[in-house]
Image: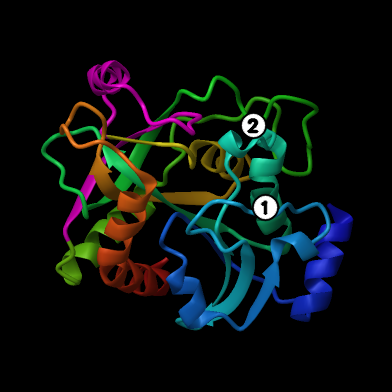
């Protein structure tokens, strides 16, 4: 960790970010428009390269709305074969750099048939179906307690601010529970029906690990899903990643506008 922090501080001139953003599939353009410094993951000690389409693999530093921001332009996924420790390592680095608020975005499938592809969903809670937990292993007492409370992973205060911001911009939004699965295969219709019965409104292959670690480390967390498609069984259309990228591209202006204005109020 020390080598990572030292390298980043050397590259950024000891830039201290207060807000962190993880940009999901197809949503990385926001970082392109604001970046002051961009460091490839594969140049940062203890970071790995990102290999998924729509994920550039850059750690981007910028000042937006007068606030210092660090952005992950692309994330690590458990399905790529990375350990949970690797997947969540950048969140721990953000904490050490000074981040107090983390916005986690993703592309997700709509489980609730009343939601529409292209909607933005503010995550109120999640169900972790990944079969593991990023906090398993030796605890780092400098980050958080061994048995952290998870009763409010996603800050109600930030959700309220996100709702107010979306309404002021006339951006359609939903609120709901996110089900996190390992992937990389999409879920079966039977699995989606199970998630629906259990109360999930959307399903995806990320976010829960980062949110757990951020909450554990004392950060306020806001989760935003870009609903890029209906999940299996909700519609009869076969699922593919290209559809995810295309839908994210269609709503990116609303998404970028929301993020830009949210930074001003959090």
200 and 189: which is toward the camera: 189
Q: Which residue is drawn at 70% across and 27% down?
A: 146
Mark 1: give few (<14), some (14-19) or many (20+) Cα within 10 Å: many
Q: Is residue 40 above or below residue 248?
A: below
Is 8 on the left or on the right of 266, as rendered? Answer: right
Q: Residue at x 50, y 81 (%)?
A: 34
Q: Give the range drawn in magenta.
A: 172-201
Quadrant holding the C terminus: bottom left
Is 253 on the left or on the right of 102, as rendered? Answer: left
Q: Is residue 204 above or below residue 7?
A: above
Q: Which mark is residue 42?
A: none
- Give the labeled residue for mark 1: 90
Looking at the picture, how far across and down is residue 114, in whole percent?
11, 38
157 and 72: which is toward the camera: 72
Q: Is residue 250 visible?
A: yes
Looking at the picture, how far across and down is residue 151, in whole percent?
45, 30
- Disc 1 element: helix
Is 145 on the left or on the right of 261, as rendered? Answer: right
Looking at the picture, how far across and down is residue 236, in whole percent?
16, 32
Mark 2: give few (<14), some (14-19) or many (20+) Cα within 10 Å: some
Q: Which residue is drawn at 40% across and 75% down?
A: 264
Q: Farthest left residue?
A: 114
Is 210 on the left or on the right of 157, as rendered? Answer: right
Q: Which mark is residue 134?
A: 2
């Amino acid at each position: 960790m020390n080598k990572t922090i030292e390298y980043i501080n050397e590259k950024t001139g000891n830039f201290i970010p207060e807000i962190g953003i993880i940009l999901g599939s197809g949503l990385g353009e926001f970082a392109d428009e604001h970046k002051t410094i961009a460091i490839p993951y594969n140049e940062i000690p203890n970071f790995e390269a990102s290999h998924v389409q729509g994920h550039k693999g850059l750690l981007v530093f910028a000042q937006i709305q007068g606030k210092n921001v660090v952005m992950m332009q692309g994330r690590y996924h458990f399905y790529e074969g990375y350990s949970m420790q690797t997947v969540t390592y950048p969140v721990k680095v953000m904490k050490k750099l000074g981040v107090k608020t983390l916005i986690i975005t993703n592309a997700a499938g709509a489980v609730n048939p009343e939601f529409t592809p292209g909607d933005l969903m503010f995550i109120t809670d999640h169900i972790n179906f990944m079969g593991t937990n990023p906090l398993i292993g030796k605890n780092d007492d400098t980050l958080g307690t061994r048995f952290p409370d998870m009763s409010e992973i996603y800050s109600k205060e930030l959700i309220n601010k996100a709702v107010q911001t979306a309404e002021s911009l006339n951006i359609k939004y939903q609120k709901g529970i996110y089900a996190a699965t390992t992937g990389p295969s999409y879920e079966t219709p039977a699995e989606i029906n199970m998630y629906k019965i259990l109360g999930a409104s959307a399903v995806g292959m990320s976010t829960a690990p980062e949110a757990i670690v951020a909450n554990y480390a004392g950060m306020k967390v806001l989760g935003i899903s870009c609903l890029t498609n209906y999940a299996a069984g909700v519609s009869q259309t076969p699922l593919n990643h290209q559809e995810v990228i295309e839908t994210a591209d269609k709503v990116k202006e609303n998404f970028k506008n929301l993020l830009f204005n949210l930074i001003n109020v959090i």
